[in-house]
Image (tube, rainbow, N blue to C red):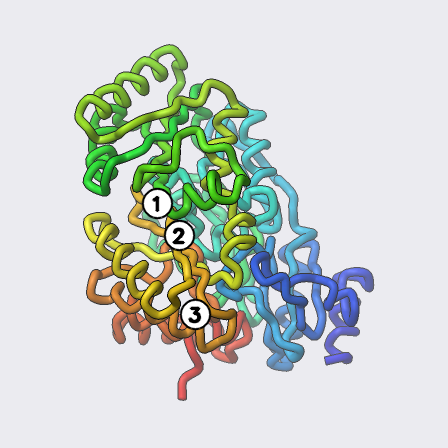
Amino acid sequence: MQSLLERIVAIVGEGNVLTGDDVAQRRVDWMSGASCRAGAIVRPANTDELAQVMRLCHAVAQPVVTHGGLTGLVHGGEARPDELAISLERMTAIEAIDPIGGSMTVQAGIALQTVQEAAAEHDLQFALDLGARGSCTIGGNIATNAGGVRVIRYGMMRQQVLGLEAVLADGSVVSSMNRMLKNNAGYDLKQLFIGSEGTLGIVTRAVLRLQPRMTSERTALVACPDFEGVTGLLRHLGRALGGSLGTFEVMWRNHYALLTEESGRNTPPLPARWPFYAIVESLGSDDAANIVQFSAALESALEAGLIEDAVLAQSDAQRQGIWDIREDIEGLIDHLSPLFTFDVSLPIPDMADYADTLERRISERWPKGRMVIFGHLGDGNLHVSVGAGSGDPQTRREVEQIVYGPLAELGGSISAEHGIGLEKRDYLPLSRNPGEIALMRTLKQALDPKGLLNRHKILAPEE
């Protein structure tokens, strides 16, 4: 590897090939905080430098792992000592903003929040939003097809990408930097790389779709008497608010109570005595009209018995206080460690029974264990956090089987928005049939025949 690194230094510069302690001091992901074990970290400045690096790696069959913001939860950025990590941390430029066409061209290492702020300066918005906005990168968002809290209104990351550029395993560059909303000229090649977790190519640049900025944002926390109230409220708001419904996030009482009254970490706007709590937001361009419509929708929901109580945020600070309860992942880690986290999707009508079954099976197996649930319910996505036993691999395996087992019968997915990585790889057949997996292998073989890109992620090695 040393000879290869010397040749890479000539391309990216000596200060941009990290080895030894400079590698070990870096974490490999956000949740575990484990040290990076890669043989070296290479930091190219642009697509051309990365293409040259990959040509060298391809010639000697050197495997690589791509690093973005390292906020993933499925060990997608894990690298072994015989692998190189390719960090896109120097590739953070905004190349162009087109306020008329509604697009922004960026390098893949730029942080999501930076893109959001740049769009706002032009009275536009980049619609993707999630808790890790300050550190996650656009390349990582693309690689995992990130979701977040606005999917119900704007869709997943896939819907926010007009075009992209990627470097393949052999150093070839596929540049499909389309800026148009409509382009039916042959295969839509960008779709190959969105959600591929860096296994088919390394995304280096992207053209992002921008939306008109909504000047009015109204937020409420509501308490629902039962799950029928939750689903009824979702339908009710969909009708009453129409296209202005921007967010519908649900917290089971076990999540809400733990992070407010039990832990004291967050002030509860409502008592923690109801089984379900929802954060709902309406987005509009006319604040006066928006608040009237939003208030009327909540009042009619209260009259219909869909909600028991509600608090409307009257300031940015109150809105943030509501969201702090939903996004307090550090609190879950503090109170549930060793913590196992899951990101699943399933049909909304099956969620209540699914959650009840999980809670019962967890408590039967680990009497002192605990489970909490929150999620983007309007998108069919639940985040399940389990504190049970110890953090050993056997316990993890048992918890995984409890959480993932019912999904196949329900037609659900083991991953709604976080990807597969290494952590969920063995459970992929629960969500994808043999024909689908075979086609995935065909694509991988076609684009990366030597298996150099994020090897063994998503797809297990064939026996």
Q: CA distance from mark 3 to mark 2?
A: 27 Å
User: With 20 as the anchor, is 370 left or right in this view?
Assistant: left
- The percent coordinates of residue 367 (x first, y second) are 38, 65
Q: Are marks 2 and 1 in contact (CB under 8 Å)?
A: yes
Helix, strand or loop at mark 1? strand
At label 2, which amino acid type do we have? Answer: Val
Give the number of the disc on residue 252.
1
Q: Position of residue 154 (x, y in %)?
A: 37, 37
- Residue 78 lies in quadrant: bottom right
Q: Which residue is mark 2?
A: 372
Of residues 193 and 405, the one drawn nearer to the viewer in this rendering:
405
Question: Which amino acid is tagged 1?
Answer: Trp
Q: CA distance from mark 2 to mark 1?
A: 7 Å
Query: What x and y, as percent, mark residue 252?
Result: 34, 45
Residue lying at 69% horizontally and 59% vertically, measured from the top left: 44
Amino acid, disc 3: Ile
- Mark 1 against mark 3, which lies toward the viewer? 1
